[in-house]
Image (cartoon, rainbow, N blue to C red):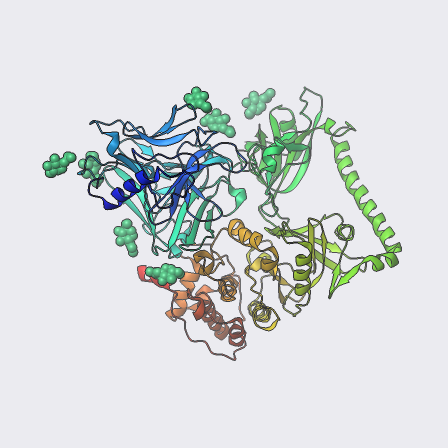
Amino acid sequence: MGIGNDPCFMFSALFLCWFSFITNHLSLGAVDTISATQSLSGDQTIVSAGGTFEMGFYKPGKSSNYYISMWYYEVSPKTIVWVANRDIPISNKYSSVLKILDGNLVLLNESQIIIWSTNHKSTTTTSSNFVAAVLGDDGNLVLRDGSNSNSTKPIWQSFDHPTHSWLPGSKFAYDKRTKTHQVLTSWKNSEDPSPGLFSLNLDATSIQFLLLWNGSEQYWTGGPWNGQFFSLVPEMRGDYMYNFSYHDNENESYFIYTPYNSSFISGFIMDVSGQVKVVTWLRGTKERNVLWTLPVQQCEVYAFCGAFGTCNENTLPFCNCPNGFNPTSSNDWNSMSYSGGCMRRTELVCRNNEKKDTFLEYPNMRLPKHPRSVAVGSAEECEFTCLSNCSCTAYAYDSDGCSIWIGDLFNMQELLENDDRGRTLYLRVAVSMYSSGKNKKGIIGVVLGSVSVVLVFSGLIFAVGKRRQVDEEQTTTVYGSLVAFRYKDVRRATKNFKEKMGGGGFGSVFKGKLPDSTTIAVKQLASVNQGEKQFRAEVSTLGTIQHVNLVRLHGFCSEGKKKLLVYEYMQNGSLDSHLFHKMESKVLDWKTRYQIALGTAKGLAYLHEECRDCIIHCDIKPENILLDVDFSPKVADFGLAKLLGREFSKVLTTMRGTTGYLAPEWILGVAITNKADVYSYGMMLFELISGRRNTYQSEATKYFPIWASSVVIEGGDVFSLLDSKLETHVDVEEVWRICKLACWCIQDDANHRPSMGDVVQVLQGILDVKPSPIPRLLQALVDDD
Ligand SMILES: *[C@@H]1O[C@H](CO)[C@@H](O)[C@H](O)[C@H]1NC(C)=O
Ligand SMILES: *[C@@H]1O[C@H](CO)[C@@H](O)[C@H](O)[C@H]1NC(C)=O
Ligand SMILES: *[C@@H]1O[C@H](CO)[C@@H](O)[C@H](O)[C@H]1NC(C)=O
Ligand SMILES: *[C@@H]1O[C@H](CO)[C@@H](O)[C@H](O)[C@H]1NC(C)=O
Ligand SMILES: *[C@@H]1O[C@H](CO)[C@@H](O)[C@H](O)[C@H]1NC(C)=O
Ligand SMILES: *[C@@H]1O[C@H](CO)[C@@H](O)[C@H](O)[C@H]1NC(C)=O
Ligand SMILES: *[C@@H]1O[C@H](CO)[C@@H](O)[C@H](O)[C@H]1NC(C)=O
């Protein structure tokens, strides 16, 4: 295809010629080509013929630098997929130009010096007059020689030079002739596209994708390709959106993928967070969805919080510095770039026989990477070993023996108290960090001392509080049925937010006690963008919603940016802790599980059908089903989707980042109805049955909802699906009913799913349930077997 016989090309060229008489400022919307007669400068852009991609100068965030970049046209947030001059920015886009020069596409900076080029060394003398670069609707910028109309092979194409994203239809390849792998490298930070520390790599030997830090430290793999999917990410196969395939020939081996439905535009992006984000949206809609983030958990990313930084999956921001440490660069830290890590406020003093350093105890930690084990027999010897080497920064001693760490600590993670991965880490600090300058025992004394001072102090406050209770009641306003708490009262009730029970993207939850001894759970909302009036209005609506299967809102606090919700406290915590965590002693029996399924359904049915404004929960998962003292379930966090608006959907997609409970509608970008909750509820039913996360696998091919559906539809042995921890007293009929129901709830088409009211009736045995058709996506999988 060449300039002579490609009508589109000719048209664009003519169009460009005509256009160059007109001011640059007009939109060049219809132009997709850079040619001898048309270059790109200033605010000009080219747009692919189908309007999918746009290219031009782009200035990321608050940076003052410009880069020739390609992004999805009309999609927000603006998502860059390719950058030409990622290492060498320019600062004036009006005096820089992207043009064809000597058969290449080149970028000239303000001094008209070439700073980026397609670098093609032509074998024949190509005339620049016939060379042109066309931005395709697939996101491929292709440089062709129009004078050689027989040549179909491009001179150069951006698909062969990806930067940080992998687009549908392009190869992710290993070139056997040059022995080179393609690599996607993250940006340095959100304002600097130059190569950062995280990269997505193809291991051609074992045929798998790896995520590496600094080119060496592997922190994630999708598992080997088994011909159909990557063994550790079955949900990628379970989703019917993409056709992944692997090809191997004498010259190269590569992966390629295409969406089955061309209405979906998507891409794999190696994000600055160190996660691969698979983004997608429906043609015609402007809003982007993040379909998957790999790895799902931010804290799995190696060194995400830098040296000495601790990662916490349950707080925003994810990164914190330990006591005695400050962020190395608070600027970076404030702009959410944590890789610089933390540094000591007081340097260690290391002199022989002088105990100038000591250790701070950190319980419930995931230990840093790269420990060295030391063969000693006691905690004291372990501590001594560390203390006697000036480069030793931490130690841990437990049933696995003594481990010490030399140099910077990476990958520390704060875990929740009931997490059985938690260990205790002893972090070396300078004694002089404390003014006392005493020995180690002294330090622990100081730490304990200050804790008890706080306790005594808060005790005092309580006493004062009690005395002034008459006052208090006068200043506590009641808002509808809700109490509007003052921040200082909530702080007092939670002992300055001391006892954290859990948390997530919306903020942490703390246990507290009101002066009248009512135990409460306080949810600290991470970010609310609503105005005061609207916030109060929304919250007071939530306050009117009362149902035995919904967690009761007592009140709220709203002072400036401080937004808190005060809920009733639930003794038995959340469902996930009983289903999935090994530490729990009591296994939920079948009857209890059935009642939890029924109660949850009743709560949701009330939200969907009976309260004044229908509420879609949007985030049904075991973490949001709380259990009362008698294990009756109450749905938590309802109404937050509306309250938090955009923040909520951001959290949904970026925090969880997995399709685990999310209905296809979320991914497809179509309207969300209350049937989205039904889907999530169905996914949760499977977990209630199996006692495991759906994403857990015993054998690579068995994605539980898929397996369970096929068992149900073939009339197989439903008992094989049950949690092995369940003993006797299982009602066969109930198991069948709940399994069939779960299959109906996860139908692809929202219209085929039952309403929550129907679900209640089925569980009560009032409505009968026939076997469901296999969902389309499951059908495909079952057929493959
Ligand atoms: C243009 O690039 C050249 C070579 O990198 C450099 O020496 C020169 O300073 C640049 N001009 C401007 C205005 O930045
Ligand atoms: C294209 O191929 C035809 C026949 O194969 C040949 O006659 C012609 O010279 C070629 N044109 C160019 C520009 O190479
Ligand atoms: C990355 O690795 C190189 C050597 O391969 C090393 O010099 C550099 O310091 C490392 N970067 C960081 C941030 O540790
Ligand atoms: C998937 O893609 C491969 C390679 O592009 C193609 O051969 C195959 O037919 C496609 N499969 C489906 C079901 O579209
Ligand atoms: C491999 O490369 C050679 C030389 O470029 C080419 O002739 C051959 O067709 C290629 N093989 C495949 C399968 O593409
Ligand atoms: C692609 O998805 C859209 C939106 O869900 C749907 O309307 C359309 O029918 C789908 N096309 C195909 C070929 O499945
Ligand atoms: C401290 O430990 C490291 C690693 O084991 C070792 O290389 C170094 O020599 C030790 N330093 C001293 C003073 O023992």
512 relative to 479, above or below: above
Q: Residue at x 67, y 22 (%)?
A: 350
Q: Residue at x 55, y 51 (%)?
A: 651
Farthest residue to the front: give it. Answer: 21
- Position of 633 compared to 154: left or right? right
**The N terminus sits in image quarter:** top left
Closest to the observer, 751 or 9 = 9
Q: Quadrant of residue 325?
A: top right
Q: Residue at x 52, y 80 (%)?
A: 766
Task: Inspect this view and state whether residue 156 appears.
Answer: yes
**The C terminus sits in image quarter:** bottom left
Q: Find residue 36 and report its horizontal and vertical position in percent.
A: 29, 33
Closest to the observer, 98 or 585 = 98
Question: Which quadrant does ligand 2 occupy?
Answer: top left
- Position of 444 compared to 331: left or right? right
Q: Residue at x 56, y 59 (%)?
A: 622
Q: Find residue 625 and report its horizontal and vertical position in percent.
A: 60, 62
Q: How many marks?
A: 0
